[in-house]
Amino acid sequence: ELCSSAPRCVETANLFLGSAAETMQQDDVGDYAMPKLSLQEQMYDGTMQPEGSRLFAKIGYAPIRSYLENENLDDVEAARIVLGNYARSSLDIMVGATTKERRHNASTDTDIGRTLLFLAHAVY
């Protein structure tokens, strides 16, 4: 239920989760509680500024490869740093969420299966 706070990402996540809920009801799977999104500001833009905006202005929406295999070596290095920081930040968020969940389950002595949903948006 971790979600970038980017408005487009939140909208897409809600559409996806709403559709999943409808499918679960149609398939009569049983009770299904719509997950609550935990909006993560740092997944939006926090770790990418200001270099991310500069690169995006230059390259635009493109495959990550376009950022990492660019002819301009300074841009390649900047992209590696920006994308690496974003990846580390995202992993830190996931580890924090799973650690918190593990502690919660340990304190209640339950061993229930859980699914981590990680919803992000286009990375420049």
Image (cartoon, grey):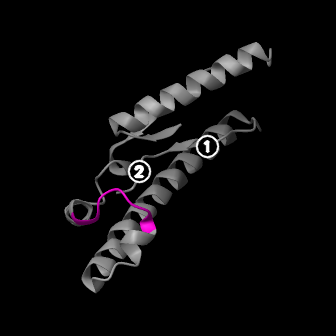
What percent of the width, then of the height, locates residue 96?
Answer: 50, 51
Q: Nearer the viewer, mark 1 or mark 2?
A: 2
Is residue 62 inside the magenta stretch?
A: yes
Q: Earlier in the sequence, mark 1 or mark 2?
A: 1
What percent of the width, then of the height, locates residue 55?
Answer: 25, 66
Sort mark 1 into few (<14), some (14-19) or many (20+) by Cα contacts within 10 Å. Answer: few
Residue 76 visible, this orientation: yes
Q: Is residue 20 above or below residue 59?
A: above
**Which residue does the image show at 33% across and 79% down from the upper left?**
76
Instruction: Identify which amino acid the numbered label 2 is placed on.
Output: Ala
User: 100 or 34, which lies in front?
Assistant: 34
User: 48 or 90, which lies in front?
Assistant: 48
Q: Which mark is residue 77?
A: none
Tell me: 93 left or right of 17: left
| Secondary structure of residue under mark 2 | loop
Q: Which mark is residue 116?
A: 1
Residue 35 visible, this orientation: no
Alpha carbon separation for disc pair 1 and 2: 19 Å
Which residue is identified by label 2?
Answer: 122
Residue 65 picture quarter: bottom left
Q: Is residue 13 above or below residue 121?
A: above
**Which residue does the image show at 57% across and 27% down from the upper left?**
17
Tell me: 69 left or right of 94: left
**Which residue does the image show at 39% across and 56% down from the upper left?**
123
Which residues lie in the magenta part?
A: 58-64
User: 107 or 34, which lies in front?
Assistant: 34
Instruction: Identify which amino acid the numbered label 1 is placed on.
Output: Leu
